[in-house]
Image (cartoon, rainbow, N blue to C red):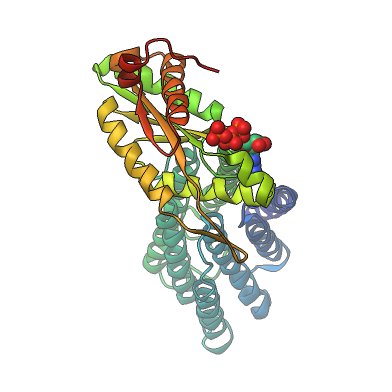
Amino acid sequence: MSLDLRTMMLMISVLTLLLSGLLALAGLHAGSIRGVRLWALASLCYSLASFIAFADMTPTSSAWLIVLGAVLVMAGNGLQFSGIQAFKEQRIDWRIPLLIVGVVFAQSVWFTLLYPDASARAIANSLVFALINALCARALLIRIEPPLRTAYWFTGASFAVLAAASLIRAATIFHAPPGTFVGLFSQVPFVPARFLASSLILMCVTFGFILMLNYRLITDMQKIALHDGLTGALNRRGLEEEAIRLSAHCNRKGDTLAIMMIDVDHFKLINDRNGHQLGDKVLQRLAAVAQASVRSDDYFARYGGEEFCILLPSTTEEEARVLADRLRQAYAALTMEFGGEVLRSTISIGVADSIHVGLEFSALVSAADQAMYWAKQKGRNRVVAHSVMVCNVPEIVTI
Ligand SMILES: Nc1nc2c(ncn2[C@@H]2O[C@H](COP(=O)(O)OP(=O)(O)OP(=O)(O)O)[C@@H](O)[C@H]2O)c(=O)[nH]1
């Protein structure tokens, strides 16, 4: 049984057209995710190129159609490269796709119309194709968190295989006996099989991108579900998930876990005097100061309303108290200016640790909360450690 190249061309043209439509539909609801429409356009370019090959690419086909086919393939590849940059939220560097399309156009015109040499044209275009695919592979084979890593590496590996296949194609044509390569349908060894394999890998690349999109949407949804929209900090649910993980980790390692509960002083007054919107901005400023002061393995969260929480692994209550006091001072020193209004505010912080109250998250929160309310009762703008408070005030009343 032999593979019919033209039938394959038609099928690939239809399949890539369907993929283009699918990506265009996906792009309608991709929200802030960029690059999807560029990939839809890339698939359309491949579809048109395959259709031209199906319709007319024979050794006697029109020279301009040959040039157009090559340019469409390169434009598709260039759009994929730009789409990857957009997807990664990088600035799109249009010079690269424009350059490769320009080079392929020039060498296709040169070797088709001016100095016809199908072999040289195929080798030159295969080398450019290998280069752009290698660039796409390099952009995707990077360190990234799972589950996106699976999709990035699958797509990147597919691009790498395409780059290798293009180099092999160039080498095969280069070593083919003179006169045997006259175009896409030439009888050099394995042309249909190699073309089929390359087309399938090209499909893998598009499926890989759809997988990237899917995982990115999942990751974004998880992020939204676990973070507070106003401040960007973890929300209570996110904090509880991290707390369960951290407690288990500290339990296994025999490590301590400290906690800070932070509450803005007289926040109701700030709201009442300046309005809720300004109150929101104050919360954002506090979150920014706290985010800047936490270490990379600490977890900062909005516990609710104007109350924030920081989980500090491998930290004792005393160490947490020192960090909390630094945060309190940094926030108190902040002069907030909102549309000509100057505002200063303070926070009260309660700290506790697992040495005194155990690793149970609810016990840690309750202890730090008691200490925080004690700080409020003592006059606000201060830090209170739970163990110290317990020694001084045995019958603390909590709200
Ligand atoms: N602007 C704004 N206000 C909020 C938000 N969540 C809760 N609040 C307000 O925060 C205020 C909390 O007030 P209280 O619990 O009485 O405490 P407080 O005025 O800070 O007084 P102390 O804690 O005793 O210093 C209430 O007025 C809530 O409406 C929010 O997301 N944005």
On screen, residue 163 versus residue 338, left or right, reads: left
Q: Quadrant of residue 236?
A: top right
Q: Quadrant of the C terminus?
A: top right
Q: Quadrant of the N terminus?
A: top right
Which residue reaches farthest top?
Answer: 395
Q: Which of the pair 257/9 is nearer the observer?
A: 257
Q: Which of the pair 167/100 is nearer the observer?
A: 100
Q: Which of the pair 108/85 is nearer the observer?
A: 85
Give how far across and how far down residue 3 sits, in percent. 60, 47
The answer to whether residue 52 is above or below residue 246 is: below
Q: Residue at x 46, y 65 (%)?
A: 132
The answer to whether residue 65 is above or below residue 163 is: below
Residue 34 appears in the picture as rendered: yes
Q: Quadrant of ligand 1?
A: top right
Q: Residue at x 52, y 82 (%)?
A: 111
Q: Residue at x 49, y 45 (%)?
A: 287
